[in-house]
Amino acid sequence: DREVSEGQYEELIRNKTGSLFGAATEIGAGLNGGGKQPRRRELFRRFGEVVGVAFQIVDDLFDYQSAVDTTGKPVGHDLAEGKVTLPLIPALRNPGTRDGRRLRALASRKRWTFAQWEQLKALIEEAGGFAYARQRAEQLAADARDILSVEPPSPVRRALEDAVDYSIRRTH
């Protein structure tokens, strides 16, 4: 569905990766002295959800910008399965795209030649899709750090801050 909105995409990944990360951090908070502190567990759940969404956006960037030997999955796999992800969403909506018709045609395919795939990536880059997705992941990472800022400095907080950094700076 090339008409999927950014809001629909984020809702989907929040319900998928975000909920997984959120459950893990909420459970961790509960086991780490927060069992009787529902507000603290909720804080850590929200933190995990936000980190999970950022993590998934970066993963979706890999689907366009990495190689199978780096990620362990075929490049272009998500789009070939019909999954429109954040790098493509703003590119499809950007009226400044010089060759919007070509972008839509390439984005509708299930298989590409090497040249077609490279052209698709170039069009997404030109339309700002990759930069936008990266900026959105960075913003979510900042939001996660803000959520975590109410926690006093500790090794646990530092580990979670490191997890935020890893989620958006990883290479695979």
Image: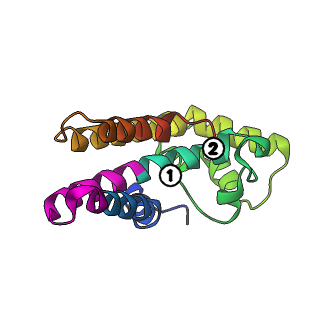
Q: Position of residue 31 (x, y in %)?
A: 30, 61
| Residue 121 percent coordinates (x, y) | 67, 39
Between 99 and 123, the one nearer to me in the picture: 123
Q: Residue at x 47, y 60 (%)?
A: 17
Give the quarter of the figure containing the C terminus: top right
**Left-right relation of 68 to 15:** right
> What residue would you read off at disc 1?
56
Per the image, is 47 magenta?
A: yes
Q: Can residue 130 be spotted in the picture?
A: yes
> Which residue is drawn at the image coordinates 70% and 46% (left, top)?
71
Secondary structure of the residue carrying tag 1 is helix
Question: Is residue 108 visible to the viewer in this orientation of the structure?
Answer: no
Which sits in the foreground, 161 or 137? 161
Indicate the amino acid at tag 2: Phe
Residue denoted by label 2: 62
Estimate the spatial distance between the alpha carbons at disc 1 and disc 2, rounded to whole Å.
10 Å
Decide: is 27 above or below 117: below
Q: Which residues are magenta?
A: 29-51
The image quadrant of residue 80 is bottom right
- 153 w.r.t. 77: above or below: above
Residue 141 is situated, as x and y percent measured from the top left of the image, at 36, 39
Q: Is residue 110 left or right of residue 165?
A: right
Magenta-drawn stretch contains 85: no
Q: Quadrant of residue 111?
A: bottom right
